[in-house]
Image (cartoon, rainbow, N blue to C red):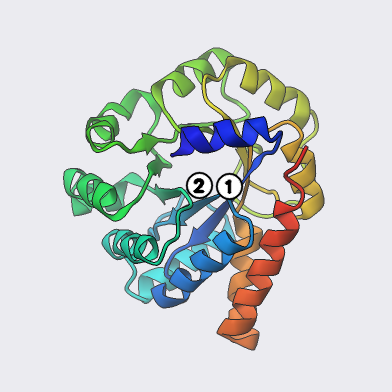
């Protein structure tokens, strides 16, 4: 599904908008409605963030969201089962299960891969699975038709990026900044130049993520990336609006924000 989507968007000269959702914050019932709203509002791909007690790649916003989600009782199985309900309701957008390896390992990787396939998950992104340790993930994703989304950092040598991309499928998640997730005020210096270099060596479409927080930043990233990922700013907006104004207002605010980003994806 991801391959076909990127082929379609390439013909339209448009980047994909990828929305990261911290599932279960503040509860899974709200997340289910939120996924529907962002898909209706122009998100091409949805990353379903699995809460974890030690999210080492994440900044304060997603750390806090993960803790709230864990307190609500959300886990990897309940998130995948939510996907089945969304598919039954007609949501067709690609879903990427975004997780650390621990929740997958504890629940049983074979079980989770099979359940992912049955319920309509399209891909896994395992944050802490480096190239050298990815075989144990691939041995369950490939037989179940799941894409394995690899990651590369600004500090990753281009030669290694080529190997990382060749080992994965779907798209390459390029982390735009060194450090943890979190909204930034601007893209890094030399971002466009570096992204062009990464795209030259990557056999996969390249998604740029970490720090993108405004339509202007999304527009700038879309000029050089195949996809633009927005996470922390969206998670923060949805949570704050929910707490201050309630569920309906949070869904409306989320939809408006995603629409403002989606409008900037056309090159």
SS type, badge 2: loop
| Residue 253 falls left or right of residue 59 | right
Report the front residue among 1 and 45.
Answer: 1
Name the residue located 58 percent from the left edge and 35 percent from the top edge.
8
Check the picture and name the quadrant holding the C terminus: top right
**Sooner in the amino-acid sequence: mark 1 or mark 2:** 2
Residue 240 visible in the shown view = no
Q: Position of residue 62 (x, y in %)?
A: 53, 60
Residue 239 quadrant: bottom right
Residue at which label 2 appears: 57
Q: Position of residue 38 (x, y in %)?
A: 58, 63
Q: Is residue 47 above or below residue 209?
A: below
| Residue 104 falls left or right of residue 166 | left
Q: Is residue 53 above or below residue 265?
A: below
Check the picture and name the quadrant holding the N terminus: top left
Instruction: Tell me, yes or no, whether the two marked residues, 1 and 2, touch with CB atoms within 8 Å.
Output: yes
Q: Position of residue 231 (x, y in %)?
A: 59, 55
Q: Position of residue 60 (x, y in %)?
A: 57, 61
Residue 53 quadrant: bottom left
Picture disc at residue 180: 1
Q: Residues within 10 Å of mark 1 (few under 14, many from 20)?
A: some
| Residue 103 falls left or right of residue 236 | left
Name the residue located 46 percent from the left edge and 22 percent from the top edge.
164
SS type, badge 1: loop
Report the front residue among 65 and 237.
Answer: 237
Name the residue located 24 percent from the left edge and 45 percent from the top edge.
113
Residue 125 quadrant: top left
């Amino acid at each position: 599904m991801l391959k076909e989507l990127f082929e379609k968007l390439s013909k339209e000269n448009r980047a994909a908008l990828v929305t990261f959702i911290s599932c279960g914050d503040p509860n899974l019932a709200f997340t289910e409605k939120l996924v529907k709203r962002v898909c209706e509002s122009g998100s091409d791909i949805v990353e379903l963030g699995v809460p974890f007690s030690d999210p080492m790649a994440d900044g304060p916003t997603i750390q806090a969201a993960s803790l709230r989600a864990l307190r609500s009782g959300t886990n990897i199985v309940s998130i995948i089962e939510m996907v089945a309900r969304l598919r039954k309701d007609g949501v067709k957008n690609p879903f990427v299960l975004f997780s650390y390896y621990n929740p997958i390992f504890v629940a049983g990787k074979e079980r989770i891969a099979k359940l992912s396939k049955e319920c309509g998950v399209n891909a896994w992104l395992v944050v802490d699975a480096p190239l050298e340790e990815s075989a144990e993930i691939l041995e369950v994703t490939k037989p179940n038709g799941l894409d394995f989304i690899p990651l590369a950092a600004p500090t990753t040598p281009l030669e290694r990026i080529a190997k990382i991309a060749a080992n994965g499928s779907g798209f390459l998640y390029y982390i735009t900044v060194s450090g943890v997730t979190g909204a930034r005020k601007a893209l890094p210096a030399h971002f466009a130049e570096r992204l062009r270099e990464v795209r030259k060596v990557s056999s996969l479409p390249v998604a740029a993520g970490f720090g993108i927080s405004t339509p202007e930043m999304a527009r700038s990233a879309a000029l050089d990336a195949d996809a633009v990922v927005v996470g922390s700013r969206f998670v923060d907006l949805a949570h704050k609006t929910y707490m201050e104004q309630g569920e309906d207002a949070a869904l409306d605010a989320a939809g408006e924000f995603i629409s403002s980003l989606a409008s900037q994806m056309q090159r």
